[in-house]
């Protein structure tokens, strides 16, 4: 039996999208750490807008502060609500790396004046073209970043937009804050579309919390559970890089294993579990309080992923597992 989600590993509870007073949030990085740890979190990616900050001073044996940044590539419009854009989270392999690849002083915008003394960049000016966004992704990957596409619906991304992106590590399948505001940011259909048409990437959830006025609106709803044996920055990043995680807005997945052509799932009580594969190949189990579910894999299965739904509307999503992940 081969574990895809190993019950022997710690499930580090992570928020992979967060803003503080270093950009347009209101809490300090320390305050974010305190609030999230009080809600059982072990990991926060501090993804403030446009400026990379080294928050590694917050990392200890019980908490990992991931070095990250959220880059914007905008297609200007007279009114910002009509402005199409790409928002990318970049997660750094090196917690102390604050060099801005794929960025210029113009891109840093209003944050440049606050942090100009520490702003180092390669001078690449981001504009809304296919060539540019893929160059940003390429530069980021070469510099040791994992690149994630954030909240595609809020960004007004069409199928043509997200399908032209090459080299993405992940897609934010739920942006909790934006989902609360708009009801459109749980987007498994976009993940399915990308998978079905040859894109190989992972899926995450994040809060995108800003804590306006010090409130917790938009916090603690989009969790990514990262599997590690011990909680260190290097272990967390390695698990992210390999896809050794799942994400959830509610139920936990306790284990996922392959035994021959059998998929075996253990989870929190659920009312529906779905195995999804390519092009309308899916299998369902319905019931009350489902905690153990098994599926037979089809012989021609190129990939599969699991969705667990509870009676409160929560969804747990695994990454897509391809044949190289589950076939010996």
Image (cartoon, rainbow, N blue to C red):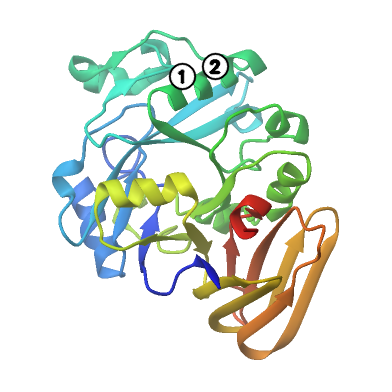
**Mark 1 secondary-structure assignment:** helix
Q: Where 290 falls versus 319 (above or below)?
A: below
Pick the front one: 228 or 323: 323
Pick the front one: 279 or 207: 279
Query: Residue 182, position in %: x, y?
Result: 62, 53
Name the residue located 72 percent from the left edge and 76 percent from the top edge: 295
Name the residue located 23 percent from the left edge and 22 percent from the top edge: 114
Give the crowd class for mark 2: few <14, some 14-19, many >=20 residues within 10 Å.
some
Q: Is residue 187 something one can see in this rendering?
A: no
Query: Residue 201, position in %: x, y?
Result: 60, 43
**Mark 2 secondary-structure assignment:** helix
Give the quarter of the image for residue 162: top right
Query: Residue 145, position in %: x, y?
Result: 41, 32
User: Which quadrant of the figure contains the N terminus?
Assistant: bottom right
Q: Where 309 falls versus 79 (above or below)?
A: below
Give the crowd class for mark 1: few <14, some 14-19, many >=20 residues within 10 Å.
some
């Amino acid at each position: 039996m081969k574990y895809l989600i190993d019950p022997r590993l710690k499930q580090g509870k992570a928020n992979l999208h967060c803003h503080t007073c270093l950009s347009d949030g209101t809490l300090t990085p320390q305050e974010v750490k305190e609030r999230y740890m009080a809600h059982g979190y072990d990991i926060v990616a501090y993804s403030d807008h446009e400026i990379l900050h080294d928050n590694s001073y917050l990392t200890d044996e019980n908490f990992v502060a991931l070095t990250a940044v959220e880059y914007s590539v905008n297609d200007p419009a007279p009114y910002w609500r009509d402005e199409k854009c790409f928002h990318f989270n970049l997660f750094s392999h090196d917690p102390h790396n604050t060099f801005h690849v794929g960025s210029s002083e113009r891109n840093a915008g209003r944050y440049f004046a606050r942090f100009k003394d520490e702003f180092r960049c390669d001078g690449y000016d981001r504009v809304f073209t296919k060539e540019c966004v893929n160059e940003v992704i390429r530069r980021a990957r070469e510099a040791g970043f994992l690149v994630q596409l954030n909240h595609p619906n809020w960004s007004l991304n069409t199928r043509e937009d997200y399908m032209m992106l090459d080299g993405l590590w992940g897609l934010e399948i739920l942006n909790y804050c934006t989902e609360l505001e708009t009801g459109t940011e749980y987007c498994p259909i976009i993940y399915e579309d990308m998978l079905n048409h040859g894109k190989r990437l992972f899926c995450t959830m994040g809060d995108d919390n800003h804590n306006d006025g010090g409130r917790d609106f938009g916090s603690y709803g989009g969790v990514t559970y990262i599997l590690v044996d011990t909680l260190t920055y290097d272990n967390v990043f390695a698990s992210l890089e390999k896809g050794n995680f799942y994400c959830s807005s509610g139920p936990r997945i306790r284990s996922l294993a392959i035994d021959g052509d059998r998929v075996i799932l253990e989870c929190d009580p659920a009312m529906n579990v779905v195995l999804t594969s390519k092009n309308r190949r899916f299998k369902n189990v319905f019931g009350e309080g489902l905690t153990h579910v098994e599926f037979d894999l089809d012989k021609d299965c190129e990939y599969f992923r699991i969705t667990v739904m509870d009676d409160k509307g929560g969804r747990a999503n695994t990454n897509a597992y391809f044949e190289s992940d589950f076939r010996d």
